[in-house]
Image: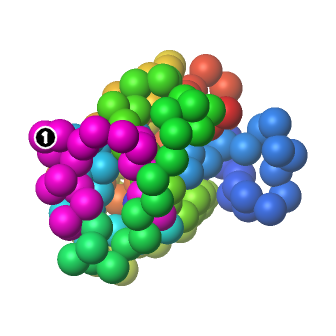
Amino acid sequence: MKKEINNKKINKNTVKDEEKLTDDIVEGRNAVLELLESGKDINKIFIQKGEKHGSIYKIIAKAKENKVVVVEVQKSKLDEMSNGKNHQGVIATVPPYKYSDVEEILNLAKERKEDAFILILDGIEDPHNLGSIIRTAETAGVHGIIIPKRRACRSK
């Protein structure tokens, strides 16, 4: 999924730490399970130590099937990593999103011989909502998503 911010390509290495605009975690049981089933790259999955129940078993099994490293950590570590403190005992780390400019998005559509399908978002503050919108947009065939530099959810 390609994105663009204020018509500028964002390179993760050139953005100051406090201004990083890429989310590199997916948190919550359903979101992580959906990520595992999508076949997307996952760096690692962090599972809360202690009693496990419900969908955690399915996440662990799917992670092993996909050869994704699973690490058990204390709840405090998950709380520290979490954007919204609603991790439900599981967080996946993923490679950063690739940001592009509008020209690259339009070229993608042209390469596919399709009319450009671009989604423009403004004021999305909840990372869970943004993640849901991105996943839905991808399945709908969106070529790119434009998000603002300010007033958008960000990683910590």
In the rendered image, which residue does mark 1 sit on?
54
Q: Is residue 45 in the magenta section?
A: yes
- 24 lies left or right of 41: right
Residue 59 image point, x, y percent: 23, 56
Residue 31 image point, x, y percent: 28, 44
Residue 54, relative to residue 84: is it above or below?
below
Residue in view at x 43 percent, y 70 percent: 69
Front residue of this view, candidates 117 and 58: 58
Residue in view at x 25 percent, y 60 percent: 60
- 2 lies left or right of 61: right
Examine the image and state in which quarter residue 38 appears: bottom left
Q: Look at the image and tell me in which quarter the C terminus lies.
A: top right
Give the mark count.
Answer: 1
Examine the image and state in which quarter residue 83 appears: top right
**Mark 1 Cα shell of 10 Å, populated few (<14), some (14-19), many (≥20):** few
Residue in view at x 73 percent, y 61 percent: 11
- 51 lies left or right of 107: left
Residue in view at x 49 percent, y 24 percent: 84
Residue 89, relative to residue 1: is it above or below?
above
Q: Give the residues drawn in magenta, as a range.
A: 44-62
